[in-house]
Amino acid sequence: MTMAYVDTPVIWDIDVDFIEGSITAIIGPNGAGKSTLLKGMMGLMKPLTGTTRFWGKRYEDVREKIAYVPQTESVNWDFPITVLDVVMMGQYGNKGVFHRISKKEKEMAYDALTQMKMEKFADRHIADLSGGQKQRVFIARAINQNADIYIMDEPLAGVDKNTEHIIMEKFKEFQKHGKTIIVVHHDMNTLIDYFDHVVVIDKVVKGQGKCSEVFKNTTPMEWMARRR
Ligand SMILES: Nc1ncnc2c1ncn2[C@@H]1O[C@H](COP(=O)(O)OP(=O)(O)OP(=O)(O)O)[C@@H](O)[C@H]1O
Ligand SMILES: [Mg+2]
């Protein structure tokens, strides 16, 4: 896949496979094109060349099976919507925003919030949460969608260690249930602990595969430094 905002491509010939059931980190420096790659995969931006397939199918045909959480600062929450509403959006999918919400749907959303220890904030306006709290709400929404693939752009950015722990435990649990997790990550120190697969990009693919193979005999930090 090659993608551009203006004329010059910001990512070139990106050819990556994500392994079903893996927990994969996408890493690379600021401006490397990580978020752009996800936008291309999710059909939010049209690539110059290339396509993405999920189980051989187009995104539009499997969208309810895929949960996507964009990078927090890219979301504008000026319109009035509560935390519980945001989580319920995970279920709307094809039903549209204006269908009648059932008691059951509300309970499920509340349960997802509880799993992320955010139930106390259910009625609060989403804009009035801290960055880390917002991040937990987005993950609750993804839980509520009950997807098979979770694609998240820097879910650990700006969150404290406790929130990081809650989020990573949730990802591990997803993985135990056979789900696939794809996460843009920037902390080289936790990479090996948290992820089993990695995709390294910096405008082009610099490496991909199992962490144990890509970083054989070295650390992620050294590996990255050598390829700068
Ligand atoms: N809306 C836009 N218009 C023009 N250029 C953009 C736009 N969004 C991103 N870019 C450029 O595309 C390149 C890749 O950006 P992208 O956001 O994908 O990087 P990233 O790897 O996600 O970085 P970060 O780690 O900072 O989130 C950068 O050079 C950036 O300046
Ligand atoms: Mg980004």
Image (cartoon, grey):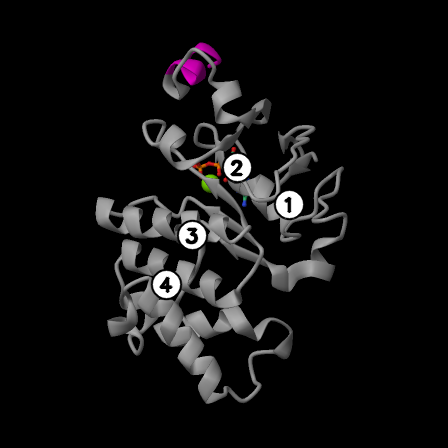
Circle 1 — which element? helix
Circle 4 — which element? helix
Q: Residues within 10 Å of mark 4 (few under 14, many from 20)?
A: many
Q: Residue at x 55, y 50 (%)?
A: 178
**148 or 202: nearer the eye?**
148
Amino acid at circle 3? Glu
Determine whether label 2 and label 4 are within 8 Å by CB.
no
Q: Residue at x 36, y 63 (%)?
A: 137
The answer to whether residue 137 shows anywhere in this view is yes
Marks 4 and 1, the one that precedes in the sequence: 1
Q: CA distance from mark 4 to mark 1?
A: 24 Å
Image side of residue 73 versus residue 96, left or right = left
Q: In the displayed structure, would residue 95 be above or below residue 21?
A: below
Q: Which residue is mark 3?
A: 173
The answer to whether residue 80 shows anywhere in this view is no
Q: Which residue is mark 4?
A: 137
Q: Residues within 10 Å of mark 2 (few under 14, many from 20)?
A: many
Label 3 near ligand 2 (CB < 8 Å): no
The tag on residue 40 is: 1
